[in-house]
Amino acid sequence: MTSGLLPLSGMVVLDLTQIMAGPVCTMLLADMGADVIKLERPNGGDDTRRMGPPFINGLGAGFLALNRNKRSLVLNLQKEEGKEVFRKLLQKAEVVVENFRPGVMARLGLGYEELAELKPNLIYCTISGFGSTGPYRNRGGFDLVAQGMSGLMSITGFPDSPPAKVGVPITDISAGLLAANGILCAYIHALKTGQGQMVDTSLLEAGIAYTIWESSSYFASDEVPGPLGSAHRVNAPYQALRTKDGYINIGAATQSTWEQFCRATGLASLIEDERFVAPSDRKIREKLLADLLEETLSQQTTDYWLRLLDEAGVVAGPIYDMAQVYRDPHVKARNMLVDLEDPELGLLHNIGIPIKLSATPGEIRRRAPGLGEHTREILREYGFSAKEMAALIDDSVVNA
């Protein structure tokens, strides 16, 4: 049973971000009830508005996915009047999020130090390619570059193949997740003490944070790990194996699941086979083991093995394309596909909220905003008169 309240209701976030990492962060906050005011530059706003195809009524599908539950205000921070509007908005805000290169906000007179003087309990989050300190702090950063420099591309793909990136912009998305986590930690501290602080994360650090198995292996052995395809760094069999009509993911990572797998597939003799007795034996002979298993698995379809292994309690799964993901009954039951009906854009499909709170669940309440769609609404809420708004529009400080 829900209370009707969203967990972050009352939190105001001034969102100066665009593209992906920052918008992921602020989307997570908005989904949980924060009032995220997306401050967009004149002459086009967030670049992802134009990124595609595909487009929905002229808007990039990615923009619509990343900016739900937010309101848009177009604000020219190059003008002093625009900075004054920002400072007035700051009076009610708890959080500022930006993903400019380090130093951009300070040159505008709106850096953390300047804003913290105006509001000591402010949570100021900066997301960049390399962080706000260190020799690379002034470099631009994209997910592809961060994947390369974090080591992710060196461990992705198959041995002796050209470099491959993870199929999604994983450092962008994970930097957004880390930023949201950091903001909430800082927010709790501010509620307890009244002390604000800066939250600083980067695409590079987000990528490195994923390399737990690989970094720990390197630290322990001084050997540089390489790509393994779908295989696991320390467990076997733990990979995609060929069936009669495709592939199946097998996760026999522990001794008990290995033995269950062998019995279920009619390969009980492998349990006592001296080549595969211990987990380390199976890992050392991973290629030989995979070949032996595929001789049996290739005799039946993926669905056949999935049913059999599920009944035996063995962890296994199919390999879906995106259409299959959203047809899956469990995905539907977990509300990971949420539809919004919009009078202008029609039916919009949304990725659901992946965190389920029992008392105060998040909610997808509105589609991504049109450019400057809420400029007048927000300015009225912050005490600007009709005459003041007209002057700001005439002077190209805001667009409405």
Image (cartoon, rainbow, N blue to C red):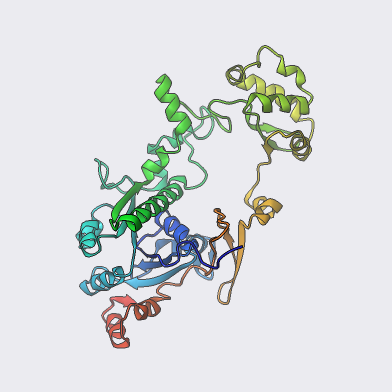
Q: Residue at x 48, y 40 (%)?
A: 165
Residue at the front extreme?
Answer: 192
Q: Look at the picture and state if 227 lies above or below 75.
A: above
Q: Quadrant of the N terminus?
A: bottom right
- Left or right position of 52 against 328: left
Q: Position of residue 337 (x, y in %)?
A: 62, 59
Q: Residue at x 27, y 42 (%)?
A: 136
Q: Position of residue 345 (x, y in %)?
A: 56, 72
Whether residue 61 can be seen here: yes
- Left or right position of 76 against 260: left
Q: Look at the picture and state if 190 lies above or below 298.
A: below
Q: Nearer the viewer, residue 91 or 225?
A: 91
Whether residue 400 can be seen here: no
Q: Quadrant of residue 81?
A: bottom left
Q: Residue at x 41, y 66 (%)?
A: 36
Q: Nearer the viewer, residue 286 or 154?
A: 286
Q: Quadrant of the C terminus?
A: bottom left
Q: Position of residue 58 (x, y in %)?
A: 50, 69
